């Protein structure tokens, strides 16, 4: 029997103990979402969608429409997967939380995106450490309807096993962080967002595009793979791609010789500029300085 205390403080992730298959997927059991959970999705969706015109890239906004993501509750992964599969062959598979790296790579290589099935609790509406359904589905899934991006993420998954075998996962993880999670794209009408970590965060949506604090640096594969990151604050440097095709072209190659070169080079701090950088905007770091001063 559930105690009053449990009712007042429901578990953060109610799928945490769900039975896992060998590939770490679980049953979403869409009917089990309560009204409060659907309402939380709807409010997160409404808040974020209002900020995205003129900030998110066109490819993302077009895909959001093509997949018919909306303010009608937490999406049913099976239905969403049918729409996505018709466009690019990808599907969305439910998981209870982060999955081991090798499992994650295998899913991506097979065009399956593992998405958290739980939705963040009310008291963590603005920031959660663990990826939930809003971050994963609203942030990551739409661009999988774009054929070029879809191929890029599959190639990333295919490269993952090789990076693991070489013991150079950190380099590959930095590529994911600075593009899939926090990437910007240059367009004729200005910088736009494509990274899921930004697209699912109202504060970072504004910060990444409009604030004068961070550096914005043109994407260069090896440079990105050398750049460390911090996970619990806005990025000190954002990387800007020219197009999804150039991102795919850069990543659709054997990273072996690149990993060999990277072994001999030091990593770069998140704020650091390096010789050869094509700087889009040089950060004044006022946000980060104010935060340090206040600490
Ligand atoms: Fe993510």
Image (tube, rainbow, N blue to C red):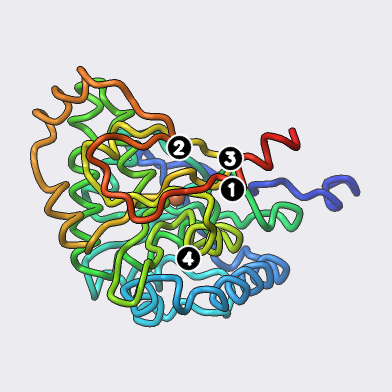
Label 4 sits on a secondary structure element that is: helix
Q: Is residue 6 visible?
A: yes
Instruction: Indicate whether 113 appears above or below 199.
Output: above
Q: Residue furthest top?
A: 264
Q: Which mark is residue 15?
A: 1
Crowd rating for badge 2 (residues with CA inside 10 Å; few <14, some 14–19, many 20+)? some
Q: Residue 187: name its quadrant.
A: bottom left
- Residue 69, x across and y down, in percent: 46, 76
The front one of 9 and 63 is 63
Going from the N terminus, do you reach mark 3 or mark 2 first? 3
Q: Which mark is residue 271?
A: 2
Going from the N terminus, do you reach mark 1 or mark 3 first? 1
Seen at 52% across and 56% down, the residue is 212
Question: Label 4 belongs to which residue?
Answer: 138
Which callout, 2 or 4, points to the residue nearer the camera? 2
Q: Indicate left or right for 26 with 168 as reference.
A: right
Instruction: Indicate whether 157 appears above or below 189.
Output: above
Q: Is residue 114 visible?
A: no
Crowd rating for badge 1 (residues with CA inside 10 Å; few <14, some 14–19, many 20+)? many
Q: Residue 113: name its quadrant.
A: bottom left
Seen at 58% across and 54% down, the residue is 118
Inter-mark Cα distance, 1 to 3: 24 Å
Crowd rating for badge 3 (residues with CA inside 10 Å; few <14, some 14–19, many 20+)? few
Quarter of the image containing the C terminus?
top right
Which callout, 4 or 3, points to the residue nearer the camera? 3
Question: Label 3 belongs to which residue?
Answer: 232
């Amino acid at each position: 029997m559930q105690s009053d205390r449990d009712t007042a403080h429901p578990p953060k992730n109610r799928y945490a103990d769900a039975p896992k298959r060998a590939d770490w997927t679980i049953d979403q059991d869409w009917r089990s979402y309560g009204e409060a959970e659907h309402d939380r999705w709807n409010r997160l969706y409404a808040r974020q969608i209002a900020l995205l015109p003129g900030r998110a890239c066109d490819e993302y906004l077009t895909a959001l429409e093509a997949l018919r993501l909306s303010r009608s509750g937490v999406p049913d992964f099976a239905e969403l997967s049918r729409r996505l599969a018709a466009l690019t062959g990808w599907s969305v598979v439910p998981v209870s939380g982060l999955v081991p790296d090798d499992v994650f790579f295998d899913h991506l290589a097979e065009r399956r995106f593992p998405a958290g099935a739980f939705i963040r609790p009310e008291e963590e509406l603005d920031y959660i450490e663990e990826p939930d359904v809003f971050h994963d589905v609203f942030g990551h899934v739409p661009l999988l309807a774009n054929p070029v991006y879809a191929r890029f993420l599959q190639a990333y998954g295919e490269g993952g096993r090789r990076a693991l075998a070489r013991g150079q996962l950190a380099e590959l993880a930095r590529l994911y962080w600075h593009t899939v999670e926090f990437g910007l794209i240059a367009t004729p009408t200005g910088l736009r967002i494509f990274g899921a970590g930004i697209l699912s965060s109202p504060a970072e949506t504004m910060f990444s595009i409009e604030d004068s604090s961070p550096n914005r640096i043109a994407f260069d594969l090896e440079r990105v793979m050398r750049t460390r990151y911090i996970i619990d604050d806005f990025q000190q440097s954002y990387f800007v791609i020219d197009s999804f095709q150039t991102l795919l072209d850069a990543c659709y190659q054997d990273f072996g010789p690149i990993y060999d070169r990277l072994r001999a080079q030091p990593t770069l701090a998140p704020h650091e500029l390096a010789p050869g950088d094509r700087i889009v905007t040089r950060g004044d770091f006022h946000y980060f300085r104010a935060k340090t001063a206040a600490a």
